[in-house]
Amino acid sequence: MAKGNKRISISDLAEQLGLSISTISRALNNASDVSEATKQQVWALAEKLNYRPNTLAAALRKGRSNMLGVIVPHINGAFFPAVVHGIEEVASKAGFSVMICQSNEEEAQEKKHVEALLNAQVDGVLVSMSNTTREMSHFEKVRHQATPLVFFDRMPDLPNACGVVVDDYRGAYQAVEHLIRQGCRRIAHLAGPQSINTTFNRHRAYHDALLAHNLPYDEQLVLPLSGSGTAAGAAAMQELLTRRPLPDAVFSAYDFAAAGALQALEAHGLQVPHDVALVGFSNEPFTTMIKPQLTSIDQRGQLMGEVAVQLFLQILKRTEYFTGQRIVLKPTLVVRGSSVRQK
C-alpha cells in the first residue's frame, strides 16, 4: 500500500504482484498476450490502490494525448458556454477529452494557459483571444511546434490563421438597418473594444449602415463601453441621456450592456421602444425574460464550437502544414418587442 500522498505508479503494482513493469502495462491496456487471470489480478489491485495512469507519459510515448486544449476569455453569459458545449460534443465523439482554461480577458493569463497546454502535450489548441491581447508570440509558438491552432469568435491579425467566426459585420448591419426601417433616425451605438475583430466589425457595420441610408454618422452618439456587463451599459446610457437631442434608438455591442441601457432608460421615465428602440448582440437566454423582450443577433455559439473542432480534425489529418482556412457563420436577427414600433 502506498504511504502518505504518494501517487501509485506501475512500478508499485509490479512490486506488489511480483510481475514485470511491462506485464503490468500490457495488462492495464488489455493486451491479448496477457492471461485473463493476470489482467483481473492487476485491475483489482489498481482499483484497490486507486491507481491512475500518467497520461502525460503515455502521450509522450504515443505521440498523441487525445486531449484538446480550449481557452475562452470568460464563461459569463451563455455564448462561450454554448461554444464549449459544441466543442465537447464533437470532440467527445472523435475520442478527445477537453481541457478548458479561462483567460479572464488577461493577456498574461492567456499566455500561461498556452504554455500549460503545450506542456500537457495537447493535440490541438482552440482559443478565443482576450480583449487585452496585443502580443502574439504565444500563438506563433503553438504553430511553430506544429500543434493545430484554431481560433473561434475572436481572431488575431495573424497571417494564415485558421478560425471560425460569425459574420459580426452582417449581424450588426442587419440590426441597424432594422432600426432604420422602424423609423429611427438618431441611432446611438454602445461600442465594445476596437482592438478585437468582433466589436470592431460591429462598429464598422453601424457606421456603414447609417451612411448607406443617408443618415449622418455622429461620433457623439458612439459611447465606448467600459465592459460588457449591465453596469457598463447603464453608465454609457446615462452619458447618452445628457446629450441633446436624445437618440431614438440604441444598438449595443452586447446584450448585457443593452439590458443595462434598458434599466437606465426606465429610470429616466423613457419607454422602450416608444421613446428609444433597443437592439443587442448575442441572443442571451435572458433576452426573452425581460420586458420588453430584447431584439438581438444570434451568434450561433454551439454551432461555432462544433465547426471549430471539425476544422481542428481536418488540420490533424493533413500531412502538410495546413493554414489559412477561415469559416464564417451567418448570424440571425431575432426581432422582439424592444425594437418594434407601432406603425
Image (spheres, grey):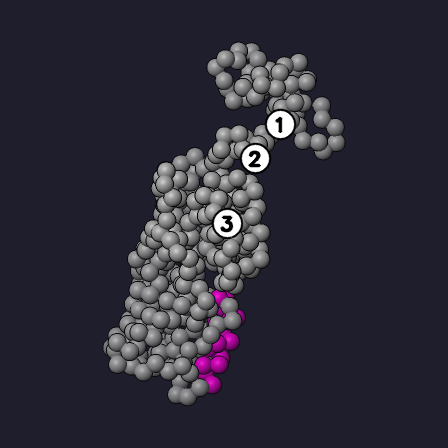
Q: Is residue 63 above or below residue 296?
A: above
Residue hosting label 3: 141
Which callout, 3 or 1, points at the residue further toward the start of the chain?
Answer: 1
Query: Which numbered tag is attached to residue 154?
Result: none
Q: Nearer the viewer, mark 1 or mark 2?
A: 2
Query: Which numbered tag is attached to residue 51?
Result: 1
Asked if disc 3 and disc 1 are in contact, CB closer than 8 Å, the reply is: no
Point out the image quarter for the C terminus: bottom left
Q: CA distance from mark 2 to mark 3?
A: 20 Å
Which callout, 2 or 3, points at the residue further toward the start of the chain?
Answer: 2
Q: Is residue 123 left or right of residue 51?
A: left
> Which residue type carries mark 1?
Tyr
Secondary structure that dominates the magenta span: helix
Q: Nearer the viewer, residue 182 or 138?
A: 138
Give the SS element for disc 2. Answer: helix
Give the SS element for disc 3. Answer: helix
Residue hosting label 2: 56
Q: Is residue 40 left or right of residue 330?
A: right
Q: Nearer the viewer, residue 83 or 325?
A: 325
Q: CA distance from mark 1 to mark 2?
A: 15 Å
Q: Which residue is painted at 56% across and 35% down in the image? A: 56
Q: Is residue 59 above or below residue 23?
A: below
Place of residue 219 in the rendered image (x, y in percent of width and height, measured from the top left): 40, 81
- Image quadrant where residue 103 sits: bottom right
Q: Which residue is painted at 48% across and 52% down in the image? A: 140
Which callout, 1 or 2, points at the residue further toward the start of the chain?
Answer: 1
Stretch in magenta: 228-242
Q: Nearer the viewer, residue 279 or 43?
A: 43
